[in-house]
Amino acid sequence: MARKKFRAEFRKNRGSRQRENDLTRDFQADRHNEDHTRDERISGKGELTRKRTIIGDVAADDAGLTAQPGIDLSVCRRGRVLSVFGLTSLVEDETGAHYQCATRRLLKTLATDQRHVVAAGDYVYFRPAAEQEGIIERVERRHGVLSRMSKGRRHIMVTNVDQLLVIGSAAEPYLKPNLIDRFLVSAEQAGLRPIIGINKVDLADPADLQPLVGVYARMGYRVLLLSARQNMGIARLRQWLGGYSTVIVGQSGVGKSSLLNAVQPDWNLRTSHVSADNQKGRHTTTTAKLLKLDSGGYVVDTPGIRQFQLWDIIPEEVAGHFRDLRPYANLCKYPNCTHTHEAHCAVKDGVADGFLDARRYESYCALVENNEPFADWD
Ligand code: GDP
Ligand code: ZN
């Protein structure tokens, strides 16, 4: 993901009263301070002000760092954008009521890329107008942005995501651990908590899956054996999804729709029969839709995101996103070691000595040597 440094003014002694009618900057800086400490490096030691360098998704910061119009909080309501269709956003307020919202013109002109003024997942302030209609006045700073490159432009698919639910299947289609690893790298890079689900365990002997599950679990990942058909693991999955915004990914046919329908039957998502022909070259919509969980939180459903490519990572960064390899990579003789052909490589030693899982290492090598996004997709 292209990263860029921003320098933003950060006022330490904000008065809480002035904040409401000030421009958004203070508000945003404040939120950022609470939620994104992980992403920021503070430099300089000024008494009243200090400069902060914020590392973040460039497009994601458009809405945050641009000074946005002041809004009247006595008439504006906070809500979340569930989906965007053309110029209209479907916004849910905090009571659960839905509004079809246009976007205030001033807000549009302030953004650097019109298409990213409002995205699915955004938290917004909107002014209710006619019944169930409104105008979006302000977009809150985003975190957890999933975007993809399309014709050289960054296209935001969904914002404010917390978790990435990576689904594979034990059979039909057969399990592809390398694909899971690839999604894990994407999740680590985007700062999302991964959950790994292996579906269709009714078609396999769970004992065969245990070694793989063990490798992921030892790295600290949440792993679930699932069967949408036999309702296995669904209660736990529902529990892990509750209260968060989760994007579900995995190749087609592994049972994502079936699992979501098992988690919440009233979603009624369309399931498909496994057919390779069917999937290849099919142009699916990329419109993201947030589905509300009865237990709180959202699952983001969109066929476009399901097969997304978050893959603009440079090979040198991959090892840092392999949780198991990372501590060894720090011990290599050469700081720019790729852990592939070098002698004196601590990662390779770790594999040879049995401390690191050989399959994970091979998966790493496949990723850095064949840095082609999802070459083996369906
Ligand atoms: P998606 O493309 O990932 O959304 O997959 P679908 O939910 O459409 O499911 C693809 C196929 O797998 C359908 O024929 C489902 O009936 C089947 N399927 C889904 N979950 C399971 C499961 O747990 N066990 C078995 N045996 N089949 C399943
Ligand atoms: Zn090395």
Image (cartoon, grey):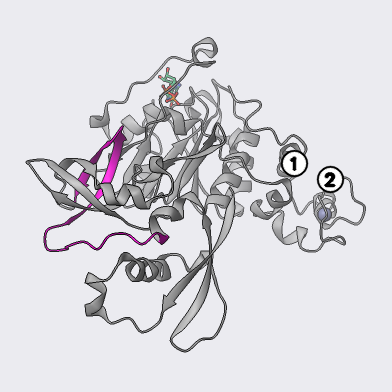
Residue 99 quadrant:
top left
* N-term-proximal mark, 2 vs 1: 2
Please name the amino acid that badge 2 sits on. Answer: Thr
Identify the residue at image location x=64%, y=52%.
Answer: 321
Residue at far right of view: 343
Q: Position of residue 231 (x, y in %)?
A: 36, 32
Q: Residues within 10 Å of mark 1 (few under 14, many from 20)?
A: some
Q: Secondary structure at mark 1?
A: helix
Query: Is the residue under label 1 in contact with that under label 2 (CB below 8 Å)?
Result: yes
Q: Which residue is mark 1?
A: 368
The residue stretch that appears in magenta:
65-93
Which of the 4 image quarters holds residue 103? top left
Q: Which mark is residue 340?
A: 2
Number of numbered callouts drawn: 2
| Mark 2 and mark 1: Cα distance apart in space | 9 Å
Which of discs 2 and 1 lies nearer the camera? The answer is 1
Residue 369 as seen in the image, left or right of residue 313: right
Say which of 39 and 352 sits in front: 39
Q: Position of residue 368 (x, y in %)?
A: 74, 41
Q: Residue furthest left?
A: 131
Task: Please say whether residue 242 is visible from this viewpoint.
Answer: no
The residue located at (27%, 71%) in the rendering is 22
Quadrant holding the C terminus? top right
Q: Pick whichever, 247 or 51, lies toward us.
A: 51
Residue at image coords 37%, 20%: 271
Q: Is residue 33 above or below residue 127?
A: below
Return the x and y of residue 80 as percentages of the image width and height.
26, 48
Residue 67 falls inside the magenta stretch: yes
> Would residue 125 appear left or right of 142 to someone viewing this image?
left
